[in-house]
Image (spheres, rainbow, N blue to C red):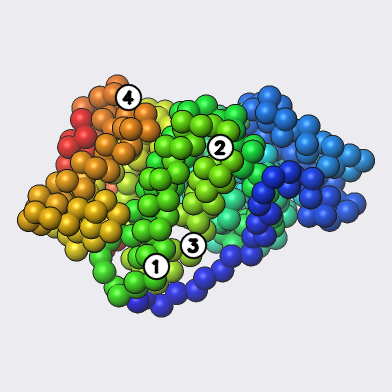
Amino acid sequence: MFDFTFYNPTKIVFGRGVIAQLPGLIPAGKKVMLVAGGGSIKRNGVYEQIRRALDGRAMVEFFGIPPNPLYETCLEAVALARAEKVEFLLSAGGGSALDATKFIAAAVPYAGKEPWDMFYDWSLVPADPLPLGCVLTLPATGSEMNGGSVVSRKATKEKRYFLSEGVFPRFSILDPQTTFSLPPRQTANGIVDAFVHVLEQYLTYDVTAPLQDRQAEAILLTLIEEGPKALAEPENYNARANLMWCATNALNGLIGCGVPQDWATHAIGHELTALYGLDHAQTLAAVYPGMMQHSRRRKREKLLQYAARVWRLETGDEETRIDAVIARTEDFFRSLGVGTRLAEYNIPKEAGRLVADRLAKQGRPLGERGDLKSQDVEAILQLRA
Ligand code: NZQ
Ligand code: ZN
């Protein structure tokens, strides 16, 4: 096992009606800014619960954070937070509202000229961002229990992220009932996103970390069991609750302790979203089967373990089992209603070269061994045309 440091300060408050606990979670006397998306929280009763819980508290609101939150929109929120002397940020919604909130928290005290620079140099993220908490209504990203913020910039068609200990939520309120109103597309996106988060940290190479392997497999098996139930019965509390807790555990750092991590599919996917506007999970469903196919030699041992332990594929020769597990994974994404081919999203053939060039310019090593080259990225996308 590799050496590691694990840090996670987020308090999770989970269950029915837990939004009512907000007053005890936000320090009294702090002026709050509520940060939200396009209005789903007004339609599903979450907004009303928050207002009731925080009745009498000084509060301003910023609505309008779009999916794949835009830098340009976030800057408007930063201006409001500064003008109103806001002291605490409360995100309500999915990963986009929360990632925007984390960025706003860092940008408010940011002293430099261009807060976007934080995405290029993480050391620029201030050590004292505004404190933040969240009411999560979409299980998917794990943002509710990590220090990551992913933001897109319209002007330059970039999608970038930073990781910083200062922007972990102080608390995250997870009431599975708030997810009953999710449209099937978002429920399915969440299942795929969480599933691929696990694969990015599990399907690499063996370093004798059986606990992390089994934790990862437990999440994958639970997503396979509970995901379809949540889609078939949107108000099945236990299915929603299990999905929510799976998504949090898929990216709160724990299963990634001491093991190699890949994340190349995410890097490719972020470029596809930046260029063509696909949902984050759509990019993952389209790219990941190609990653497995292209990396079948470098990921061989783990592919066979994943095949046996998650999909019970234990007979036949090794190549047949690997073919079968790639097909099973793709079928699972498709069974949730998420397209797995780039053509389904009208992605042109030249996307492969374009994405490969953009990633090469960023200069970050790709893959669990950092050895994926531009031609690999192009080949993976060619496999998915
Ligand atoms: O904007 P509103 O009106 O709230 O509607 C949203 C949005 O249209 C809607 N929604 C959310 N909860 C709902 C609901 N509709 C009905 N009922 C509810 N309970 O769903 C739509 C999508 O929301 P969004 O927040 O964009 O989705 P998600 O949570 O999947 O977040 C995606 C963003 O997170 C980033 C992605 O790249 C993408 O930008 N990620 C963040 C990560 C992190 N911080 O650790 C890791 C991930 O890999 C990912 O990159
Ligand atoms: Zn993701």
Q: Is residue 192 visible?
A: yes
x, y percent for residue 330: 26, 39
Q: How packed is label 4: few (under 14 Cα within 10 Å), some, or many (20 or more)?
A: some
Give the answer, above or below, for where 249 lies relative to 289: below
- The circle drawn on residue 236 is 2
Q: Quadrant of the C terminus?
A: top left
Name the N-terminal-most of marks 3 and 4: 3
Q: Amino acid at mark 3?
A: Gly
Q: How packed is label 3: few (under 14 Cα within 10 Å), some, or many (20 or more)?
A: some
Front of the two marks 1 and 3: 1
| Residue at x-position 14% and y-position 46% | 323
Q: Secondary structure at mark 2?
A: loop
* Residue that badge 4 annotates: 345
* Residue that badge 3 annotates: 253
x, y percent for residue 143: 55, 49
User: Considering depth in this image, is 112 or 56 the residue closer to the camera?
Assistant: 56
- The circle drawn on residue 212 is 1
x, y percent for residue 96: 56, 38
Q: Amino acid at mark 1?
A: Gln
x, y percent for residue 196: 37, 48
User: Considering depth in this image, is 48 or 294 the residue closer to the camera?
Assistant: 48
Total marks shown come to 4
User: Considering depth in this image, is 105 or 265 the residue closer to the camera?
Assistant: 265
Q: Does the residue at mark 2 contact the one at mark 4 (Cβ under 8 Å)? A: no
